[in-house]
């Protein structure tokens, strides 16, 4: 009776999740009745919950000695192996029982489950090798529900997380596994890969070096180490060319570096941003903008890519978008004074863009000197002078007259140093005269033309 009482206490503690107390109670029951297989079986179940596999296996072996036909001894022993990913050993335990009882439905059912787990493991690895992370995830999840404490399956999960760019999670899994075996080259490689792709390149290289010290023939560690060293060399050479003003050569090397490891998103975002800088120096702002956008797709928190994107947009006169990007940059680094100054500049350019653009009217750049402005005025004024449009339609005459007037306005402002300075500073056109009476935009454009041609 005492043994049954201890068994009931053990069952109650098991249901409450107090497995250590359950084990103690079942042990007391065994002390009272050391030939009862059920007590050993229950204690094995509690040991399994605490991942004490060797202790659980010892209880299962004891049961098989007491009663070789006690099926739960084999199914529980099988789980001691399968939960650790030891599928062959788990199948062997069940097969031993089938030799004596070929029609045992419970054993046959467990064997089918293990065969499915074996197949899922194969498919999971196959899809990982193909970088098909969605399908790999499906099979890894299925396997992990059976192999709850398998280092091999956890390695696969780490590999999967790297593929899904969850580098910190992958590195954490590898770190936990390395605590059990610090000389596992596969784990060292995987953690190195996770660190590499998260941007911690120095730590990554240390892990790869250690993996190769343990296993000099580890092919994946050798390849990743080699490709990164080549990427670094190409990037540094590209930087040297950029400093020398050889932008085409720099662009070529940055592009070659990216092709070495397309999966290294963090590093490639840096290379794209560097390539954008080279294109910006060539005033290829549209192409540079594309590189910035691609860099931000790879690393959305890369503030340098945001600032270069903002600068491209400013140069392309996309002022509203430029303001938005500089606001984003200041939010990412609220203490950066340069970003705040650039934001003010972009807002000023946005304000200025809503006025007449005298530089566009004369088709000159903002840094055009007086002689360039005069040449441009002469060309545009002759083109739109009313005398040239005598035979045009009324609508065409009206449009030419309007343009002729604006050309005169632009010339009168951009050739007057004070007015031009105020205009460039963002002052409203109506205030450019500075005398409070407003800018005389109704000045006769013919008079300006005659003065210019007469001078």
Image (cartoon, rainbow, N blue to C red):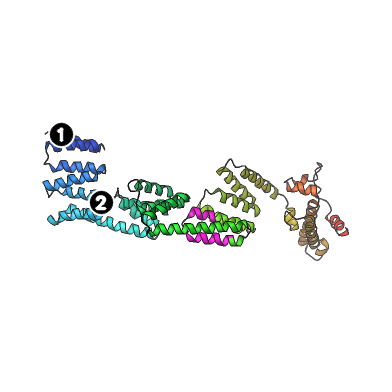
Residue highlighted by disc 1: 5
Vertical placement of 21 versus 105: above or below?
above
Q: Residues within 10 Å of mark 2 (few under 14, many from 20)?
A: many
Q: Residue at x 12, y 55 (%)?
A: 100
| Mark toward the start of the polypeptide (2 vs 1) | 1
Closer mark to the observer between disc 2 and disc 1 = 2
Q: Secondary structure at mark 1?
A: helix
Q: Residue at x 67, y 48 (%)?
A: 350
- Residue 190 appearing in the image: yes
Of 41 and 351, nearer the camera is 41
- Number of the label disc, if any, that sits on residue 287: none
Does the stretch in magenta take in 258?
yes
Mark 2 in CB contact with mark 1 (< 8 angstroms)? no
Residue highlighted by disc 2: 82
Vertical placement of 392 versus 39: above or below?
below
Q: Is residue 14 left or right of residue 257?
A: left
Residue 326: image location, x then y, percent: 60, 47
Of 45 and 92, nearer the camera is 92
Q: Is residue 317 left or right of residue 80?
A: right
Does the stretch in magenta take in 118?
no
Q: Which residues are magenta?
A: 250-271
Q: Residues within 10 Å of mark 1 (few under 14, many from 20)?
A: some
What secondary structure is the stretch in magenta mostly built from?
helix
Q: Is residue 219 left or right of residue 284?
A: left
Q: Is residue 351 left or right of residue 24?
A: right
The residues bearing labels 2 and 1 have C-alpha atoms spaced at a distance of: 32 Å
């Amino acid at each position: 009776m005492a043994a049954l009482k201890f068994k009931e206490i053990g069952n109650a503690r098991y249901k409450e999740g107090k497995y250590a107390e359950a084990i103690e109670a079942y042990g007391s029951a065994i002390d009272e009745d050391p030939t009862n297989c059920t007590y050993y079986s229950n204690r094995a179940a509690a040991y399994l919950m605490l991942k004490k596999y060797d202790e659980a296996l010892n209880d299962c072996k004891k049961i098989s000695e007491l009663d070789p036909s006690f099926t739960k001894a084999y199914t529980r022993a099988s789980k001691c192996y399968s939960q650790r990913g030891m599928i062959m050993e788990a199948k062997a335990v069940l097969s031993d029982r089938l030799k004596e009882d070929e029609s045992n439905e419970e054993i046959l059912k467990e064997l089918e489950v293990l065969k499915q787990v074996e197949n899922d493991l194969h498919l999971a690895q196959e899809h990982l090798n193909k970088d098909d992370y969605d399908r790999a995830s499906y099979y890894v999840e299925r396997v992990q529900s059976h192999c709850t404490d398998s280092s091999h399956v956890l390695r696969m999960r780490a590999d999967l997380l790297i593929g899904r760019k969850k580098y910190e999670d992958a590195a954490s899994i590898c770190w936990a596994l390395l605590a059990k075996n610090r000389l596992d080259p596969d784990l060292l490689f995987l953690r190195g890969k996770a660190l590499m792709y998260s941007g911690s390149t120095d730590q990554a290289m240390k892990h790869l070096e250690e993996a190769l010290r343990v296993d000099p023939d580890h092919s994946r560690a050798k390849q990743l180490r080699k490709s990164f060293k080549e990427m670094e060399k190409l990037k540094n050479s590209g930087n040297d060319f950029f400093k020398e003003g050889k932008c085409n050569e720099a662009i070529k090397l940055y592009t070659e570096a990216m092709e070495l490891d397309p999966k290294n998103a963090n590093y490639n975002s840096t290379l794209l941003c560097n390539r954008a800088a080279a294109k910006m120096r060539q005033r290829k702002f549209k192409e540079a903008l594309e590189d910035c956008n691609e860099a931000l797709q790879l690393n959305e928190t890369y503030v340098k890519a945001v600032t270069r994107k903002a600068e491209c947009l400013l140069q392309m006169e996309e002022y509203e978008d430029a303001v938005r990007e500089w606001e984003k940059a200041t939010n990412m680094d609220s203490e950066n004074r340069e970003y705040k100054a650039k934001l003010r500049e972009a807002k000023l350019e946005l304000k200025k863009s809503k006025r007449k653009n005298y530089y566009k009217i004369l088709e000159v750049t903002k840094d055009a000197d007086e002689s360039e402005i005069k040449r441009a005025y002469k060309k545009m004024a002759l083109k739109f002078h009313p005398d040239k449009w005598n035979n045009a339609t009324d609508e065409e005459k009206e449009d030419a007259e309007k343009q002729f007037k604006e050309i005169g306005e632009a010339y009168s402002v951009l050739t007057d140093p004070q007015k031009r300075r105020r205009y460039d500073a963002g002052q409203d056109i109506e205030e450019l005269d500075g005398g409070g009476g407003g800018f005389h935009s109704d000045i006769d454009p013919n008079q300006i033309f005659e003065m210019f041609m007469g001078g």
